[in-house]
Image (tube, rainbow, N blue to C red):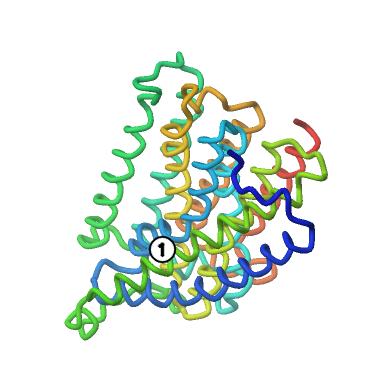
């Protein structure tokens, strides 16, 4: 069964689906950011952890649906490329956020321990993927042993990040441009409440469906070009299914929720690695990790290097740089552009 059966539709109908779904993601993404920020204030867990867990998971629903559907349909290259390609694309969204935030370098203003820990966990999860691909293709009931390990690491990392944020054993030096995530005691007294939770889950579901339609229509438009499946997943579907992350990042930056913006990207990227675990369960012929091709391994390494650059920027905290962005934003731009070029021409 194809990822989305719209191949019988004419091009005008496919474009209409793409544009309409994009508008839905745009509207819901902005609203979802506001609700997530409110959840952070009312729950007291902070913007960084909320961005990494709540916002990161919900805005990744569209990409998760795409990867799992592709894996179940027997298209592992699309499933894996969509998952890993989305990490590189979403990291690039922080460059756009840095351009929008004119007061200072975004990584300087949004530095926080939870975000640095999230980035470190992301690198650990990414590093395990090629390691699994190099080991014998052992499976239990068609599932590779790494799959439950990825879930376990994610859960333990979320707990550790939340605890680190509460204990504050390490905090960045405060400057005039640092935006501190201060607890809102009045909001905490109000509490989260069932309506807020239902609103977040409902909007997340809508974003997931809209993202699924975006990916399906993008695949239909790209199919006439004869582009290989891995490249479509790495560049096209990974970008369009990451649209919620772009919307929520820009909305969070404009509202001054900088830790939420960075945490949302890192959390979404971490959750994207779990796409591989979900896809491994859905992929019945065997271990999906052993279907990784050289271009997909290249994508994993590219995502790791880009994440390392981002963590370095959060630690180095350059206040201003060329075009009012930090060196890490410039580096991320060069890395992503070079990586896409390599995928097109070298593989």
Q: Residue at x 72, y 48 (%)?
A: 7
Q: Position of residue 292 (x, y in %)?
A: 58, 27
From the viewer's perspective, is 75 left or right of 189? right
Q: Is residue 312 above or below residue 147?
A: below
**Residue furthest out toward the top:** 136
Q: Residue at x 43, y 48 (%)?
A: 270
Q: Position of residue 190 (x, y in %)?
A: 20, 83
> Can residue 263 be seen in this snapshot?
no
The N terminus lies in which quarter of the figure?
Answer: top right
Where, by quadrant of the figure, is residue 297 drawn?
top right
**Residue furthest out toward the bottom:** 186
Q: Is residue 23 above or below residue 346?
A: below
Q: Residue at x 61, y 48 (%)?
A: 4
Q: Is residue 190 above or below residue 81?
A: below
Where does label 1 land, which residue?
Answer: 55
Q: Residue at x 57, y 75 (%)?
A: 101
Disc 1 packing (10 Å; few <14; some 14–19; many ≥20): many
Question: Residue 261 versus residue 23: which sits nearer the camera?
Answer: 23
**Residue furthest out toward the left:** 189
Q: Position of residue 213 (x, y in %)?
A: 60, 58
The C terminus lies in which quarter of the figure?
Answer: top right
Where, by quadrant of the figure, is residue 229 drawn?
top right
Question: Residue 2 versus residue 89: which sits nearer the camera?
Answer: 2
Considering the numbered disc 1 on the image, is that residue within a helix, a strand or a loop? helix
Image label count: 1
> Can residue 335 be seen in this snapshot?
yes
From the viewer's perspective, is 211 left or right of 217? left
From the viewer's perspective, is 211 left or right of 152? right
Q: Position of residue 304 (x, y in %)?
A: 53, 41
Question: Residue 74 versus residue 263: which sits nearer the camera?
Answer: 74
């Amino acid at each position: 069964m194809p990822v989305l059966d719209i191949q019988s539709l004419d091009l005008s109908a496919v474009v209409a689906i793409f544009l309409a779904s994009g508008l839905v993601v745009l509207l819901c993404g902005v609203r979802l950011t506001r609700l997530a920020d409110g959840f952070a204030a009312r729950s007291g867990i902070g913007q960084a952890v909320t961005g990494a867990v709540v916002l990161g998971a919900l805005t990744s629903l569209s990409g998760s649906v795409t990867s799992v559907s592709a894996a179940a349909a027997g298209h592992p290259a699309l499933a894996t490329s969509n998952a890993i390609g989305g990490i590189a694309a979403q990291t690039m969204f922080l460059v756009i956020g840095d351009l929008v935030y004119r007061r200072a370098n975004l990584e300087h203003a949004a530095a926080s321990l939870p975000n640095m820990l999230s980035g470190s966990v992301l690198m650990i999860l990414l590093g395990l993927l090629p390691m699994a691909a190099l080991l014998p293709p052992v499976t239990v009931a068609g599932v590779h042993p790494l799959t439950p390990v990825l879930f376990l690491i994610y859960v333990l990392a979320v707990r550790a990040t939340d605890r680190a944020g509460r204990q504050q054993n390490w905090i960045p030096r405060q400057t005039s441009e640092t935006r501190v995530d201060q607890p809102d005691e009045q909001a905490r007294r109000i509490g989260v409440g069932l309506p807020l939770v239902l609103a977040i889950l409902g909007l997340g579901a809508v974003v997931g469906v809209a993202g699924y339609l975006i990916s399906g229509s993008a695949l239909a438009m790209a199919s006439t070009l004869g582009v290989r499946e891995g490249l479509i997943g790495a560049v096209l579907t990974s970008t369009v299914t990451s649209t919620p992350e772009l919307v929520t990042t820009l909305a969070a930056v404009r509202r001054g929720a900088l830790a939420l913006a960075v945490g949302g990207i890192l959390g979404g990227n971490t959750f994207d690695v779990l796409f591989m675990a979900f896809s491994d369960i859905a992929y019945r012929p065997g271990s999906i990790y052993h279907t990784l091709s050289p271009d997909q391994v290249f994508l994993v390494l590219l995502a790791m290097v880009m994440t390392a650059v981002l963590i370095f920027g959060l630690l180095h905290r350059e206040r201003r740089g060329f075009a009012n962005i930090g060196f890490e934003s410039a580096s991320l731009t060069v890395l992503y552009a070079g990586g896409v070029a390599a995928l097109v021409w070298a593989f």
